[in-house]
Image (tube, rainbow, N blue to C red):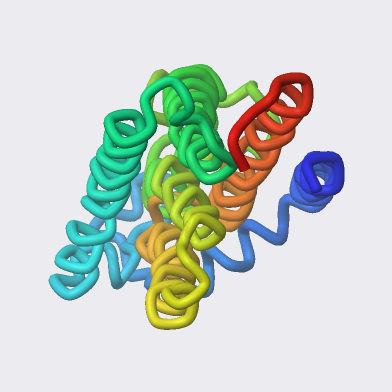
């Protein structure tokens, strides 16, 4: 699973890098151009992403941003409960999945996405580029040649959080996977879509950020399963 997701991530990055018009077409479809107040600057683009200040989107975004924090509390509470109940034998396949989820959140969303890529990729957000009323040049996904100095567009942190939430469906008891898994999957997909529709990120930022969490989660599970296979653990 990890290898397939890892390869898919790089293939998609290559596609978005090689065909940057994919990002531009999608961004233009949600951008509302308006006449500029001044025609002094040739080629100046004025307008806004119509849904950027949508109050419903802002409320939904606030709720979805809180979900990963709620999930972290639940995961840690379950780990503590298992440790208190079983003592030295607290490590099970289930608890290892919880640990994998927490590790993937820290490494994927925390380190790779927000600390490294968003800080150093240099890619301006759509609303910051001159094609959509901003002042910075457009650069394609995977290029580190942009002039964004921090909290950049590549990749989307919120999309990454959405991808991580999708992974949690695997941790749900079978009886809860339908009643909780369906809305969780819907939220997971909605988070990156909202970032694209509001001009906060390009399609590539959202897709690659979302998928990156799945890659890191699969890697964490693979490593823990490998370590687990070399030890005797309670089933």
**Residue 87 image offset from top left, x and y in percent:** 37, 25
Residue at left 50%, top 55%?
171
Residue at left 77%, top 20%?
230
**Residue 139 image offset from top left, x and y in percent:** 63, 37
**Residue 2 image offset from top left, x and y in percent:** 78, 41
Q: Which of 184 and 11 is in front in this view?
A: 184
Query: Would residue 110 be found to the left or right of residue 202 on screen?
Result: left
Residue at left 41%, top 69%?
184
Q: Which of 72 and 42 is in front in this view?
A: 72
> Where's the C terminus, which quadrant?
top right
Residue 77 sits above or below residue 63 on the image: above
**In which quarter of the view is residue 81 placed?**
top left
Q: Is residue 202 visible?
A: no
Residue 163 sits above or below residue 151 on the image: below
Q: Which of 176 and 181 is in front in this view?
A: 176
Give the number of marks.
0
Query: Would residue 207 be found to the left or right of residue 223 on screen?
Result: left
**Residue 140 image offset from top left, x and y in percent:** 67, 40
Query: Would residue 63 be found to the left or right of residue 101 on screen?
Result: left
**In which quarter of the view is residue 46 placed?**
bottom left
Residue at left 85%, top 40%?
3
Residue 57 sits above or below residue 213 on the image: below
Q: Is residue 133 visible?
A: yes
Residue 10 sits above or below residue 43 on the image: above
Query: Would residue 62 be found to the left or right of residue 201 on screen?
Result: left
Q: Nearer the viewer, residue 94 or 43?
A: 94
């Amino acid at each position: 699973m990890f290898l397939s997701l890892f390869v898919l991530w790089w293939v998609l990055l290559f596609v978005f890098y090689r065909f940057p018009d994919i990002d531009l077409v999608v961004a233009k479809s949600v951008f509302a151009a308006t006449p500029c107040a001044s025609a002094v600057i040739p080629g100046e683009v004025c307008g806004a992403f119509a849904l950027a200040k949508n109050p419903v989107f802002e409320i939904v975004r606030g709720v979805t941003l809180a979900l990963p924090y709620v999930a972290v509390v639940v995961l840690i509470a379950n780990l503590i409960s298992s440790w208190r109940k079983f003592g030295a034998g607290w490590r099970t396949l289930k608890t290892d999945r919880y640990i994998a989820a927490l590790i993937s959140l820290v490494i994927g969303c925390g380190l790779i996405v927000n600390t490294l890529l968003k800080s150093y990729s240099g890619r301006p957000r759509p609303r910051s580029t001159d094609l959509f009323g901003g002042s910075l040049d457009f650069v394609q996904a995977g290029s580190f040649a942009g002039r964004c100095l921090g909290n950049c567009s590549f990749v989307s942190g919120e999309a990454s959080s959405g991808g991580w939430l999708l992974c949690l469906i695997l941790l749900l008891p079978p009886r809860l996977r339908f009643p909780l898994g369906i809305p969780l999957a819907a939220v997971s997909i909605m988070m990156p879509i909202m970032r694209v529709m509001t001009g906060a990120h390009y399609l590539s930022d959202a897709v690659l950020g979302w998928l990156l969490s799945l890659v890191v989660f699969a890697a964490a599970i693979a490593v823990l399963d490998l370590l687990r296979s070399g030890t005797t653990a309670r089933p």
